[in-house]
Amino acid sequence: MFIFPRKRENTIHIDGVPPGSFAQYHPSGWMQREILVYWFQTFIQFSKPSNGKPVLLILDFHATHTKSLDLINFAREKNVTLLCLPPHCSHRMQPLDVTFMTSLSIYYQQEVSQWLATHPGRAVTIQQVAKLYGAAFLKAAGMQTAGCSSGRNHHSGREANPILQTQRKPEILAKHRPLLQPKNAEPLQNEHCSSKNLEPQVLETDNLATSSAFAISPKDIIPPPQAASKKTEVNDKRKGETVILTSSPYKIELEYQVEEKKKEHEKYAIKEEKIVLW
């Protein structure tokens, strides 16, 4: 799914996209709750959950994921469990970031560089993003990328814990490489060398010491600009936590928060009406 920062739909933006792709439009270009519900309907068509075969969907801690009652109710009806992970550990629980997304990012950068080389003086705009992404997607979505998840550098029989797997240090490949031994080189013969050139030369340091004592650094005349110190702001936002969004306790709590917000909006609306009447 592509989200374009536009108000109106334009089919030229999805030229060359991978098969099965679609686009949504919003002025901000960011995910919205309505767009997420629309995407979830497509997810249901591909995953096909049922009572005997439920589906687990892992999401990150974002407001569009955690504050959408429509999404939670729809997921409960379709036998889908929504598991939300806090932002500080979601990258460790998403193996696609290591296998597929990394390869996709590299291929996309290559497509962009190739397009810029063949179109000098131009920049990549919103009209070329989908086509370049489609070419990179077809390269990344292959058996070679899928096999990386079961390679020796990713999994082993001893390391079954996914958290320990992501914290493992990379292998040192230098120990497997042969060391290059320097070859015996013949000494250089300089025919123009003479005894005069080999005599040590004495520099007069008295004049240098006296002159350097009065030298002024440009830093003293024009000091470099200093960046203004930033004030540390206290973050009062609630930290992310692991929670099952489709569970009854979370659903009841979210419904209570939604009702409280509605009451606050009604109070403000009544106050504004009184001010207008007076």
Image (tube, rainbow, N blue to C red):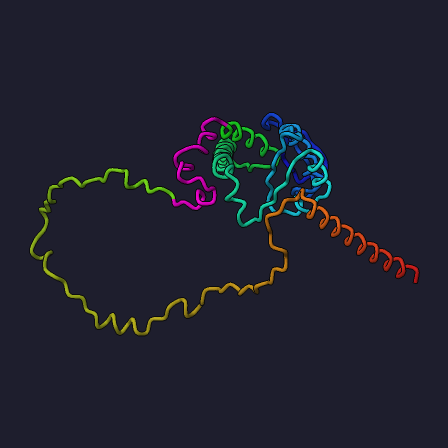
Question: Which residues, given as a range, are shown in magenta?
Answer: 142-169
> The C terminus is located in which quarter?
bottom right
Residue 202 or residue 27, whichever sits in front: 27
Spot occupied by residue 95 in the image (x, y as percentages of width and height): 50, 38
Q: Which residue lies at the image location 10% right of the left edge and 47% below the top edge?
A: 190
Seen from the viewer's position, the closer of residues 127 and 99 is 99
Indicate whether residue 154 is drawn in magenta: yes
Looking at this view, name the residue that lies furthest to the right: 277
The picture places residue 107, in percent across and down from the top left corner, at 48, 33
For this rendering, which residue is in front, 158 or 268?
158
Q: Is residue 102 left or right of residue 258?
A: left
* Residue lying furthest front: 52
Residue 163 image offset from top left, x and y in percent: 47, 45
In the picture shown, does residue 276 fall above or below 175? below
Choose between 159 and 87: the one closer to the eye: 159
Quadrant for the N terminus, please: top right
